[in-house]
Each structure stands twice: as C-alpha cells, then as structure tokens.
Amino acid sequence: MSAEPRINDRIRVPEVRLVGPNGEQVGIVSIGDALKLAQEADLDLVEVAATARPPVCKLMDYGKFKYESAMKAREARRNQAYTIIKEIKLRPKIDPHDYETKKGHVVRFLKAGDKVKVTIMFRGREQSRPELGFRLLQRLAEDVTELGFVESQPKQDGRNMIMVIGPHKKKAEAKAEKAAAKARRDDDSADRSQDEQVSAPQE
C-alpha cells in the first residue's frame, strides 16, 4: 500500500467533500467540479481523508506541501535527541583522587543530558561488605544532586552493585544550551578580534 494520497485524476469516486485552499468548507461536489475548481485555481485536488463518506479532498499545491512536510520531518529528526546511558565503574575502596576524577565524568555526562549507570565492583572479601558500595553510591548521588537524580536505587547484581542516575535536563535542552554557549563564545571572540584590529597602531 502506498502512503501517498491520491491526487487529481487518480481520485476515482463520483463525489467528494471539498475543502478550499485556506481550509474553508466548500461542501459536497462532484469529482468533475472539484477537478475543474482545482484547474482554475492552478492547484491540485488531494484526497486527505480517503475513508470518509464521501472522501474529503483539499485544494492545495501538492508539490509545495510535500516539500514542506519533508523539511519538517527532517528538522524533527535533527532535533530528536536520544538519551544515552554512560557507564562508570568504581571500587568500594577508591582513593579520593580517583573518586574526584570519576565524579567529574558523571558531572560531564549529566550536563550533556545522558543517564549514568554507576557500577561498584566487589572483589574477594569486599563482597561481604556491600554497605561500603551502598555508602559510596549514596555519596556520589548527593555530590551530583544539582545535576541528576537517582532513577534506579542501588541494587546488588552478582559481584556488582548498580545504580542509575538520570539527568534533570533533557538531552535536547542540554544540546540547545551547548549551542547557545558556543554562539556566545564565537561572538565574544569576534568582538575581541575587532577590538584588537581597532586598537592596533597604524603604520
């Protein structure tokens, strides 16, 4: 089945409910009259509701309509942002410097609008001390509370303990903010470059 609507001579019904180019209701007219009106207005007769009785047709510039629909669909796809799940792995007895480094990664991911799966890996005897991992995950969640929230509470999964932190900002918002910040930086750098040219001594 083609997704394309039937247009002009391909509409083979005795009568249609006609809608004008600006959305005005013309009423039920014969297919011959509808095609004649389309020809006079230099427009296409497009079937917009094939299952209605009689089918609903509209007068429009079909080529322009198709082009605009394709542009809108492309724009929507471009603006669509998928949330990605990033993963960070920690040890229960992580040293302070490593913790800060890992926390920095989590902060960066959340700012970009991504979810973060935090995995605590237990080895040997550490497996008998799950509270160490639980406390570490709680601490991390508190440290990044301004940027994200605990979407999935810490739970034991074999030798690991897993928690998922979701961003407060949606991916699309994060992308828009990043683009706006880049535009501001570009403007500032253009202004500085202009100022330097003005203040440079003339030969």
Image: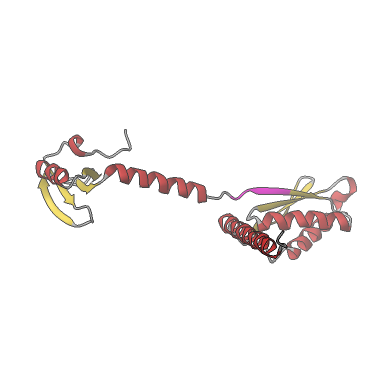
Rendered residue at 23%/39% (across/down): 7
Name the chief secondary structure element in magenta: strand
Observer-nearest of 101 and 182:
182
Dividing the image into 4 quarters, which one contains the N terminus? Answer: top left
- Place of residue 106 in the rendered image (x, y in percent of width and height, measured from the top left): 73, 55
- Place of residue 122 in the rendered image (x, y in percent of width and height, measured from the top left): 83, 48
Observer-nearest of 2 and 40:
40
Residue 109 in sight in this render: yes
Observer-nearest of 128 and 133:
133
Magenta region, residue range: 83-87
- Residue 130 falls left or right of residue 60: right
**Tag count:** 0
Picture quadrant of residue 43: top left
Vertical order, 36 against 101 (above or below): above
Rendered residue at 41%/49% (across/down): 72
Q: In the orientation shown, which residue stands out farthest toward the top? A: 1
- Place of residue 16 in the rendered image (x, y in percent of width and height, measured from the top left): 15, 45
- Place of residue 158 in the rendered image (x, y in percent of width and height, measured from the top left): 76, 45
Does the magenta portion include 79? no
Picture quadrant of residue 170: bottom right
Residue 164 in sight in this render: no
Observer-nearest of 127 and 169:
169
Does the magenta portion include 84? yes
Dividing the image into 4 quarters, which one contains the C terminus? Answer: bottom right
Vertical order, 37 against 141 (above or below): above
- Residue 67 falls left or right of residue 8: right
- Residue 117 falls left or right of residue 14: right
Indicate the colouring scheme.
secondary structure
